[in-house]
Amino acid sequence: MRKIYILLFIFSLNLHAQDKLFFKNGTKKNGFIVSISSDVVYYKDADTSLKTQQIPKTELLLVENYKGELFIFSGEKKNTIKKNLDTVVYKRNAIGIQPLGIFMGRVTFVYERFTKDNKIGFAFPLALTFDPSGKLYNSTLDTSKNAPKRLSGVNFIGGVDVNFYIGRKTNSKFFIGPRIRYGTDMFAEGIEAYTIQTQFGWKYGKPEKAGIQHLSFGFGVVRILSSPAGAQISPKQAYAAFSLNYRIGAKW
């Protein structure tokens, strides 16, 4: 009978043997520790409780279990600051020129405005057109009466591009989008027309640098509105169109 009383006494002591949690704010809490992870201490208010609670280690100074063992926690876990490319402040404006167009009788300037994340660009080109024959180079291959007449004066071609930039690379981006132009091409014998194309290409340039380049191709249709060439090119007709563009410039 005495052995039974001794076992009951030991059991009652175990019921009251609780773990102690000491907080950095000076408070203390008794409970039953379930487990200790790398960041959190899991505990129960009572041994028979079904609800497990958790306390971040950053709030605790130390834990003493019912055996008297101490678990001391050092200072708060330092946050590791990682470089995140999404937080880069992009330059949102760019101005450029298309130098290869000069050989086709075009002096083209392009202004592009980017969205905040640089994923979409709205480009507005303006080209001064002229007939380069006789100015940049002479053509003596055709001396017959049917030789095309050299045009004097200048004209203009304007339009808009919407470029959707795709990919995770920051120094080079693939892009695709619509390309629309309207105006008079003096190199093409003064044809007035508009073109609608799908353009795709690549943009080159580091986000933090001022330099920027574009190389693109376009496929679509051209609609002739008026043609001084007469029967040689039928007006009010649509034809297949192709374009190759290179732009170099600066952004800010």
Image: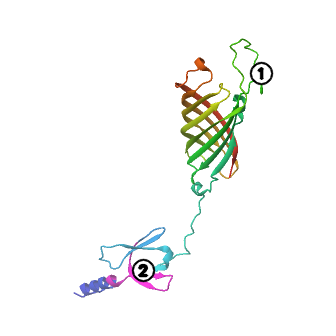
Say which amino acid is labelled 1: Asn
**9 in relation to 97, above or below:** below
For marks 2 and 1, give the CA distance.
101 Å
Residue at mark 2: 67
Q: Is residue 166 visible?
A: no
Q: Rate crowding at label 1 as few (under 14), some (14 to 19) or many (20 or more) other CA atoms within 10 Å.
A: few
User: Is 116 or 73 nearer to us in this picture?
Assistant: 116
Residue 238 at x, y percent in the picture: 52, 26
Q: Is residue 61 left or right of residue 106?
A: left
Residue that appears at 46% across and 79% down: 63
Give the image location of residue 181, x and y in percent: 58, 36
Q: Nearer the viewer, residue 195 or 20?
A: 195
Residue at 67% from the left image edge and 39% from the top image edge: 247
Q: Which span of residues is magenta-colored?
A: 14-34
The residue beneath circle 1 is: 138
Instruction: Look at the picture and state if 143 lies above or below 110.
Output: above
